[in-house]
Amino acid sequence: MKIDYASDLHFNHWMLWTQNQNKWERNTRALTNRLIENGSEEVLILAGDFSEWNCQALWILEEVAKKYERVYFTYGNHDLYLLSRTQKKKYEDSLGRIKELAREASKINNVVPLIKSVDEYKGKIFAGDMMFYLPQNEGWDFFRYQSNDSNYISLKGFSKKGMVRKMWQDSMDWYATLEETDIDVFVSHVPPVHSPFSQNDPNTCYMTKVPFINAKHWICGHDHLQCEFTKAGVHFHMNAIGYPVQYSWNSRVNYIPPYDIDPQKIFDVKTFEI
């Protein structure tokens, strides 16, 4: 089975919101096809951070579903953002936005949300969730003063700290139920380990420690890295597309491990086989 994967699409940065919705949709779909043009057409996995707008995320999913037999996705922290008064009124809180995304995406043929869920396809077991992080020590300062998550993610009835703890605990409680499950591919937005290719020190807002890993392959994002590595017998796959400013600065190498890579291949799905 060939599995294509990508994360951190951030398409709202590539195709900015505009009142000309037809143009915005047309350009979003065109960019999606550019992303998958070299894909395998079998299984595609998107590990979160589509856009700050659900409609744009759904255009992406509709488009990739035309090519792939099966599309799995989970959500990222940016998919929880509420930027406008209209969004806040419509969804009430960030989980309301995710519920809508999962509900509408499930109506698309071949698309399966992995949100605290497990699915079997062609004899392979796929599981996934966003796997919200829990800051530790100085991580709370980063969350409060540097991360936009503290400004744009909210959970009705909870403080900012309470929201983070609640979402982290929900992920951990669900993950604990998988201990006896033999998983072929796990999908999360937040990685469970610190990448050896990262040029940054470990940050608890960019990693979710888990008590066990029983997946053969783990696809994740959040770190804006493009790399593959193995830890404790688990194959980790990261293919973050990131922000266009990273390309225009010609500083994308800061997000990529020090090996040769064709810059024309950065905006592309990556593939592995199981």
Image (cartoon, rainbow, N blue to C red):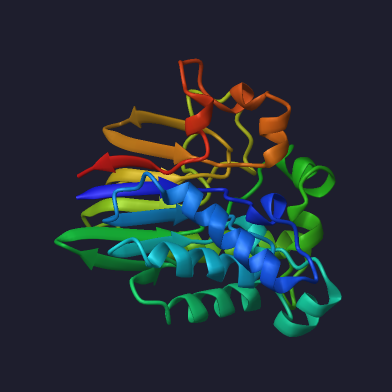
Residue beneath the point at 55% across and 68% down: 59
Picture quadrant of residue 179? bottom left
Residue at the location (44% across, 30% down)? 227
**Furthest-left residue in view?**
123
Point 74% across, 37% down: residue: 138
Image height of 147 relative to 163, above or below:
above
Percent from the top left, x then y, of residue 153? 73, 63
Regarding residue 10, the answer to whether it shows in the image is: yes
Whether residue 124 is situated above or below residue 198 in the rendered picture: below
Please say whether residue 200 is visible from this viewpoint.
no
Residue 121 at what x, y percent from top left?
A: 21, 64
- Quarter holding the C terminus is top left
Tally of numbered tags: 0
Q: Is residue 150 left or right of residue 42?
A: right
Depicted 184 relative to depicted 53: above or below: above
- Residue drawn at x 69%, y 66% is 23
Residue 106 in which image quadrant? bottom left
Looking at the image, residue 224 sits to the left or right of residue 94; the answer is left
Using residue 10 as the reference point, say whether residue 113 is left or right of it: left
Choose between 259 and 18: the one closer to the eye: 18
Give coordinates of residue 128: x percent, y percent: 40, 59
Q: Nearer the viewer, residue 171 or 263?
A: 263
